[in-house]
């Protein structure tokens, strides 16, 4: 993981005109490995299919 000083040093190497074209810079916290490895309550294939169909229909409506 990069230290704060490392990040600032890297950012200082990027030219101002290039930074002007970047809309936003986000700091995203690291996710603990344990939370990625633990299993959660799984949804049935039917439930997942329904969610996909709803999203698909919503996307179709955007481009009508």
Image (cartoon, rainbow, N blue to C red):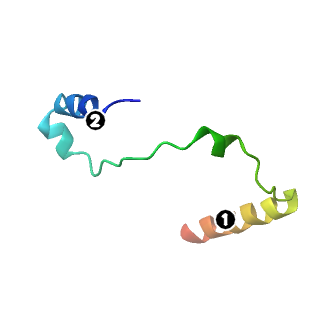
- Toward the viewer: 58 or 16? 16
- The CA span between labels 1 and 2 is 39 Å
Q: Secondary structure at mark 2?
A: helix
Query: Within the image, what quadrant is residue 13 found in?
Result: top left
**Residue depicted at x 63% and y 69%:** 58
Q: Is residue 44 left or right of residue 16?
A: right
Q: Which residue is mark 2?
A: 4
Q: Is residue 44 left or right of residue 8?
A: right
Q: Is residue 7 visible?
A: yes
Q: Earlier in the sequence, mark 1 or mark 2?
A: 2
Q: Which label is found at residue 55?
A: 1
* Quadrant in which the C terminus is drawn: bottom right
> Furthest-left residue in view?
16
Q: Quadrant of residue 20?
A: top left
* Foreground disc of the pair 1, 2: 2
- Where's residue 54, x and y in %? 71, 68
Q: Nearer the viewer, residue 53 or 7?
A: 7
Q: Residue at x 64, y 46 (%)?
A: 35
Which residue occupies 36% across, 47% down? 27
Crowd class of label 2 (few under 14; some 14 to 19; many from 20; radius 10 Å): few
On the rendered image, what quadrant is the N terminus found in?
Answer: top left
Q: Position of residue 5 (x, y in %)?
A: 24, 31
Specify the label residue 5 is tagged with: none
Q: Is any part of residue 64 visible from this angle?
A: no
Looking at the image, residue 32 sits to the left or right of residue 34; the answer is left
């Amino acid at each position: 993981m990069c230290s704060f000083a490392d990040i600032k040093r890297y950012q200082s190497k990027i030219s101002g005109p290039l930074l002007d074209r970047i809309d936003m810079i986000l700091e995203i916290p690291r996710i603990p490995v344990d939370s990625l490895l633990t299993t959660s309550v799984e949804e049935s294939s039917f439930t997942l299919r329904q969610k996909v169909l709803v999203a698909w229909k919503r996307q179709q409506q955007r481009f009508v």
